[in-house]
Amino acid sequence: MASFSDICAKDLIEQEAEWGIVTVNESDTVASVISQLKQNNITSAPVLSAKNGVLGLVDMVDLLTFACCKMGFPKPDYASSKRAVEEFLKKPVKDLIDVSGRNHYYSLGHTAKFQEILQILSKPNIHRVIINNEAGDLVGILTQSSLVAFLHKNKDKMSTLMSQSISTLFPIGQKKVQTVDFDMFVIDALRQLVEKEISGIAVVDDEGKIIGNLSASDLKRMSVDQPLQLCYDIYESIKIFMNYSGDKDKPHNDKLPTFDPVLVNADDSLGKVVDTIVTKNIHRVYVADKNNIPTGEISLCDVIQRFMGVASP
């Protein structure tokens, strides 16, 4: 059993503090915020008021929720689609703070102990925690990703757990993996993320084989500086948006992104899953059978929950 009783929030944010904290202003538009999140390769940011006080957090799930509200109508036409996209991109971010209801503002002092941080970030809808100093100033942000990266760095201290297969640690095959068909419109698939209160969903072909993953973060891959292109992206089929041809020998169209899913086997170790998540900087992996049919999903939250009671004082 590993002991991190001497570790506190201040220790965990040292590296992040060196990179600086990315913030957005309350008057920034959705287009500007998405660009900043994309540029810094992050999924959320604190929103500052004119007086530099933190109003709250905005993340990709909030932006997705608003996008679906604005653009998720049944039969889009060119005029209404263009208008909806423009309204979405021009919205001030202050109006979108926790619009999803899944992005509550949690803060801790920089002396908070590791176990308390682990406990908080093991909850499904708490993806990050704000860290303040004694004066109440924002000094860092701890995310589920940064916590898993810390566990990865210290994996040798938890070799017994890390060596266990994921089939013994997770309910693989016992719960249906949420999927969307690759012929579905992108906006309809994204709307499922909002309605089902999930952050990512597996994309499958007409044989049920997993070919990709769609998440709220994929809004960052769209052309927010080109509203007309965003119209095409939002109201296109996932197959075309993902640049999927089904032919591995056919080169991808450079103008479109690719969404290759990250797959693991049921007999892989937890250590391998953690290695994969950290090295590829992703939020989930899928377990697939020999036919590439998804049988399980492992998220950052799932990984953190397995360390509860193991990485303890």
Image (cartoon, grey):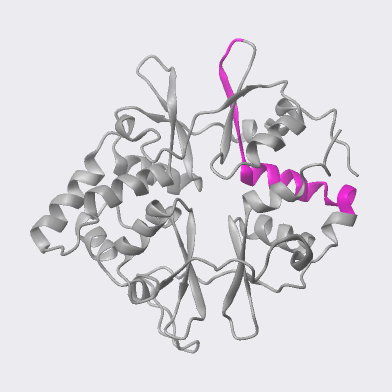
Q: Is residue 5 left or right of residue 65?
A: right
Q: Residue furthest left?
A: 79
The percent coordinates of residue 13 (x first, y second) are 67, 32
Tell me if residue 157 is in the magenta stretch. yes
Q: Residue furthest top?
A: 135
What quarter of the picture does the C terminus occupy? top right
Q: Residue furthest front?
A: 174
Q: Residue at x 32, y 34 (%)?
A: 93
**Residue at point 38%, 75% (across, down):** 182
Quick one: 295 or 70, which is closer to the camera?
295
> x, y percentage for residue 90?
22, 40
Q: Is residue 80 above or below residue 29?
A: below
Q: Locate residue 229 relative to residue 23 in the image: left or right.
A: left
- The image quarter containing residue 123 is top right
- Give the quadrant of the N terminus: top right
Please name the residue shown 83% across and 46% down the image.
154
Give the x, y percent position of residue 175.
59, 66
Left or right position of 119 against 241: right
Above or below — where is 103 with respect to 289?
Answer: above
Magenta portion: prevailing SS class: helix
Between residues 294 and 64, which one lies in front from this camera angle? 294
Above or below: residue 20 compared with residue 231: above
- Find the magenta span and give its range: 135-159
Instruction: Give how far across and how far down residue 259 sits, in percent.
Output: 47, 69
Residue at 34% across, 47% down: 65
Q: How many marks?
A: 0
> For residue 312, which quarter of the picture?
top right
Q: Is residue 122 magenta?
A: no
